[in-house]
Amino acid sequence: MVATAVPAYSSSVHKSRLTATVRAADGVRLVVTADNLFDRTAQLANYVRERCDYVLWPAEADRVRALIDTGEPEAAIELYFEHVGERWDEERLEITAP
């Protein structure tokens, strides 16, 4: 009989987490970590919904909220980061893939 060692770090034991970081000139604004894409997207959508009225021009903020309300959070996140910085401070989204 041959003994096999189980590695201390195994993909079956450790679940990869998805991370997203929102950065601005003055530092990190948000770090989101989730077990799946749906949860990470939901957390980012909440962030952009909360901030869009303060940092985007009104027409863009309306579009971001409408996309979230119609079940298109990915499009809302993309639109937010496309336009943030046109009115106030720029932000950038960094996605870390497992």
Image (spheres, helix red, strand yellow):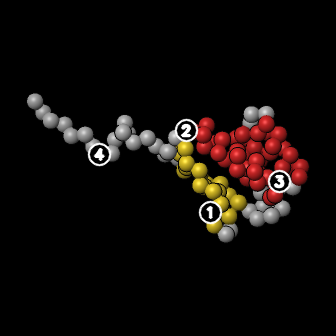
Q: Look at label 2 and name its amino acid.
A: Asn
Image marks 3 and 2: residues in contact by CB distance under 8 Å: no
Q: Position of residue 85 (x, y in %)?
A: 78, 61
Q: Position of residue 7 (x, y in %)?
A: 27, 43
Q: Secondary structure at mark 4?
A: loop
Give the residue at x 84% y 44%: 63
Q: Look at label 3 and name its amino acid.
A: Asp
Depicted 15 relative to depicted 84: above or below: above
**Figure quadrant of the N terminus:** top left
Residue 28, located in which quarter of the rendered image?
bottom right
**Residue highlighted by disc 1:** 28
Closest to the camera, between mark 3 and mark 2, is 3
Q: Secondary structure at mark 2?
A: loop
**Residue highlighted by disc 4:** 8
In whole angstroms, how far apart are the C-alphas of marks 4 and 2?
23 Å
Q: Which of pointers 4 and 1 lies earlier in the amino acid sequence? A: 4
In whole angstroms, how far apart are the C-alphas of marks 1 and 3?
20 Å
In whole angstroms, how far apart are the C-alphas of marks 4 and 3?
47 Å
**Residue highlighted by disc 2:** 36
Q: Look at label 4 and name its amino acid.
A: Ala
